[in-house]
Amino acid sequence: MRTSVLGLALAALLLVPSPALAKKGVVFVHGKGGSDLANQSVANAYWGSDMIRATTKGYAVPYLVCHYDGTQYMWVAAGQVAGQITTWMNANAVDEIQVVTHSFGGVVLRWILSNPTYDSRYPAILSRIQRVNALAPPNRGSEAANLAGTLSGSWLTGWLVSLVGQNNDSTKNCTTTSMAYYNQYYLKGSAGRPALPKPYYNVAGTGLWNDFAHGEDYGLATLSGVAGMPGEDDGMVSQYSAQGAGTNWFLTLANHHHNRRNDYRKLGTSLAGTY
């Protein structure tokens, strides 16, 4: 009798369905730049194939590289990003999303996290986001963006404008004055504001001279001095600004060009280790 009862109990356990394993995915959100970043190929090149490969563990994890117009306001960019994430996560049945952002992309994600009722697509995305890894986000703005609105004329200033970006909507978003306003009224996660609803880990860059063969390194080093960035910076975003929202994760010597790639410092390995 005892054996029969035990057998029945085991049979009952076998009939209970086991919980399905969550399907994970990675979403990349680039920073500000030109309108051509709305093209998929340009957005892919922004990150570089090695960063995408390393972060997705050799392409073993489903991923999406968002491609939005890099000249737009954060809420406009967020709408383009939300549409792409919604289509992708539904088509691939992704349950858990790790988001990797660079520069202005971190502000775009903060907008989505901070304003869940702004867009009807946001809640479903938020329910799936497990963590945001924000590389060099200008959470308190950038002195380089401040500079962009004052440049004109000479060869030097024209060259700096091309490096910083024209004084377009995304650049205006990234000034220190604008970000102080948005942090006070519209964005969560900064000092004195409600916490973000999902883990948001920032990575701040503290190096400039990564590769003497790249013109970007010379440009960022020059920009850092001309813009008068306080403390440590990566040539575009100061450490204090990157660490101005969320949780401080780590510092990297990779500058603003290299911290979106898996070359001077293998940041892709660290990103892949979070899921």
Image (cartoon, helix red, strand yellow):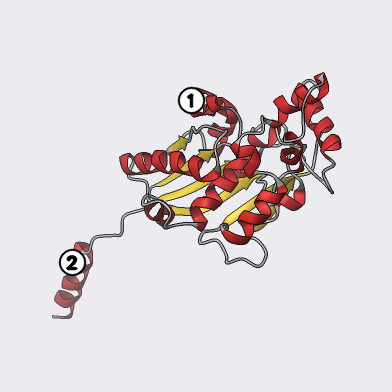
Quadrant including the N terminus: bottom left
Residue 269, located in which quarter of the rendered image?
top right
Q: Nearer the viewer, residue 121 or 170?
A: 170
**Picture layout, residue 30 above or below residue 248:** above
Tell me how far mark 2 sits from mark 1, CA to CA. Answer: 55 Å
Q: Is residue 272 visible?
A: no
Which residue does the image show at 57% across and 33% down from the upper left? 71
Which residue does the image show at 57% across and 57% down from the upper left? 187
* x and y percentages locating residue 144 in the rendered image: 75, 38
Identify which amino acid the numbered label 2 is placed on.
Answer: Ala
Q: Is residue 6 visible?
A: yes
Q: Nearer the viewer, residue 64 or 11?
A: 64
- Provide the residue designation for mark 2: 11
- Provide the residue designation for mark 1: 39
106 with respect to 23 (left or right):
right
**Picture layout, residue 274 above or below residue 198:** above
Which residue does the image show at 82% across and 23% down from the upper left? 156
Identify which amino acid the numbered label 1 is placed on.
Answer: Asn
Which residue does the image show at 32% across and 45% down from the upper left? 93
Considering only order in the chain, which callout, 1 or 2, is on the residue closer to the N terminus? 2
SS at badge 2: helix
